[in-house]
Amino acid sequence: MPTLKRADAPLEATWNRESTFESWAAWDKQFEEAKAALPELKKFNGKITQSAQALADWFDVYGQHTTRIYELTGFVGWAGNVDSSDKEATSRMGQASALGASLQAATAFVEPQLLAKGDALLAWAKEEPRLAKFEHYFHNLLRMQKNTRSEEVEEVLGMAQDPFGMFYRAYSELTNADLKFEDAVDSKGEAHPVFQSTLNTSMQSTDREQRRSAWENYHDGYLSMEKTLAALYQGNIKHMDFLATVRDFDSVLEMRLAPNNLPTQVFHNLIDVFKENLPVWHRYWAVKAKLLGLEKMAPYDVWAPILKDPPVIPYAQSVEWICEALKPLGEEYVDIMRAGSLENRWVDWAPNVEKRQGAASSRMVGRKPPYIFMSYVDSVYSLSTLAHELGHSMHSHAFAMNQPIVYNDYGAISSTVTETASNFNQAMTRAYLRKIKGDDDNFQLAMIDEAMSNFHRYFFVMPTLARFELEVYDRAKAGKPLTADVFKEIMAGLFAEGYGDTMDDDPERTAITWAQFLHLYIPYYPFQYAIGISAAHAAAERVLAGEDGAATGYRDMLAAGGSRYAMDLFKLAGVDMSSKAPIESAFAELEANVAKLEELAG
């Protein structure tokens, strides 16, 4: 596939940035207005608890100001995601980050003053109609009272978010803009440039030499910066450990899960089930090697297509199939999703070389739609990625249209729930394609290959990263040293266990995997993917079976945003995540795919 420069990307394959800001001059104008308006928020200091009406007035004003600021910060971040060479975006990222920190500092008085009012807040929520929707917010605030500090400390913590956030930003700039990789070279001696946005093309090549050189060169790039990357990650660990201590949490894990009232047992349930099922992964490495005609798999063969002539699926065809697959959720859901994918240009899908690695969806806020960026390459893999990100965007659209700003925030919604929405779309799309392409053995094999690639990311890599985090944060709490060598030793050991004897590992390169995931800068985010995929499959099974209220319950979960605790949101979709059963059921589907491959290989 040719490498595409951003300037040459077709308009229809790029995000509709003008729907949010028609120009950088418009962004600058709103930035100055938002900055100048911050003192208006401070005027409420000492007044918000004078009466129920005063508090309702505060939420009205807060929502207006916060929406404007989130439009600014979300837009500039997205501009950098799709084009790391965009100097206009890069020059404004610091401004946007500082403005976000100023907002936190300006509103630091709110929660301490609300807490001082205590249970009276709940009475006000019943008396004042404008406060009724904030009842869950008040309940959660009172529940978290022991972890909220004084106004002065909260203001300092708010101001500190900007400098502490530089670990995340520095990592992103280093890996997405500054880090360079040697070209991959295929068996014919032809070069294939390796960028974050084009790596997958080489990793999914049928040419093993291209896969090998791409994988090795990519890992070697990170190894060349291992000490810098370790220092950045260690700084982020210290930041999180500091916050957990200041807020009186027993651990960083508890701090990350407590705001959504998600039991830490959910984390440990996943790890337990994952370790029990490692032999299934060993079977998979063995059968895929056989299907690829290899004596033994190597890590760079994980993404190799089983088929030498995989289906070619243009972007528009993917959109159509995904929309057909999601019809059980109703006409409105499908119409919004189709328009967002096509004429409204939510999706920046051009595989330009300046684009950030991976794929993601942003949340909808104000005028800013739930934008998506990805690198679409006419494959089953791209089809699945698009379905995944559209699940996120439709979730964001649903809660943005139905909830106030305090619930329209990924911080207010457990990532386990957001990842349920994305994986639900994938599960529904696979089920639909199995049905309409049942007679096409080539397509079905491609679907199994893609499904296993998805399971590999969410049910192998992410739980492995979760185990890595648990050990790293335990070491940090115990005051043990954390260095690049320590990180590599932990990572290499976990992959050795996961690969077993059926994978021909390259432990020195595998060991640097920890440095390749921005997810680790948001502690205990990786494991939530696996919880999400488990809940998604359970919810999809109910909808596909036509269970009474299944589709309505799922849509209710999406629209609820952060207005309920995570476990209660799962219950809306008819899923009990306090049990290991949904996780075990998802692993059973994974094993069924492996068994099918073993049957074909036999």
Image (tube, rainbow, N blue to C red):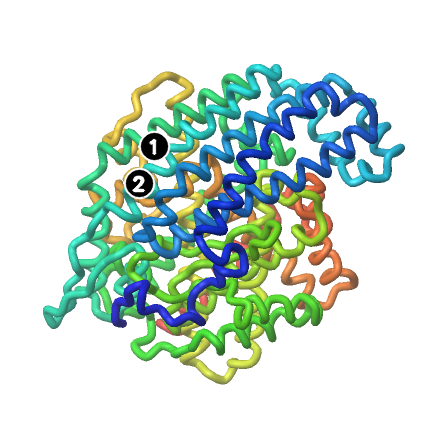
565 up-or-down from 343: above or below: above
State which quarter of the image contains the C terminus: bottom left
Tell me which numbered mark, 1 or 2, is placed earlier along the sequence: 1
Q: Is residue 599 visible?
A: no
Percent position of residue 241, x then y: 45, 23
Mark 2: which secondary structure? helix
515 up-or-down from 418: above or below: above
For the point 73% across and 68% down, which residue is it?
Answer: 546
Determine which quarter of the picture holds residue 542.
Answer: bottom right
Give the number of the disc on residue 233.
1
Q: Do the residues under discs 1 and 2 have CB atoms within 8 angstroms?
A: yes
Q: In this view, does 423 lie to the left or right of 43?
A: left
Mark 1: which secondary structure? helix
Determine which quarter of the picture holds residue 409.
Answer: top right
- Of residues 281 and 553, which is closer to you in this image? 553
- Of residues 112 and 276, which is closer to you in this image? 112
| Kind of residue at badge 2 | Ala
Percent position of residue 56, x then y: 78, 34
For the point 22% across and 32% down, which residue is it?
Answer: 227
Determine which quarter of the picture holds residue 93.
Answer: top left
Give the number of the disc on residue 114.
none
| Kind of residue at badge 1 | Tyr
Q: Which residue is the site of mark 2?
A: 515
How crowded pointer 2 is (Cα within 10 Å; few <14, some 14-19, many 20+) is rated as many
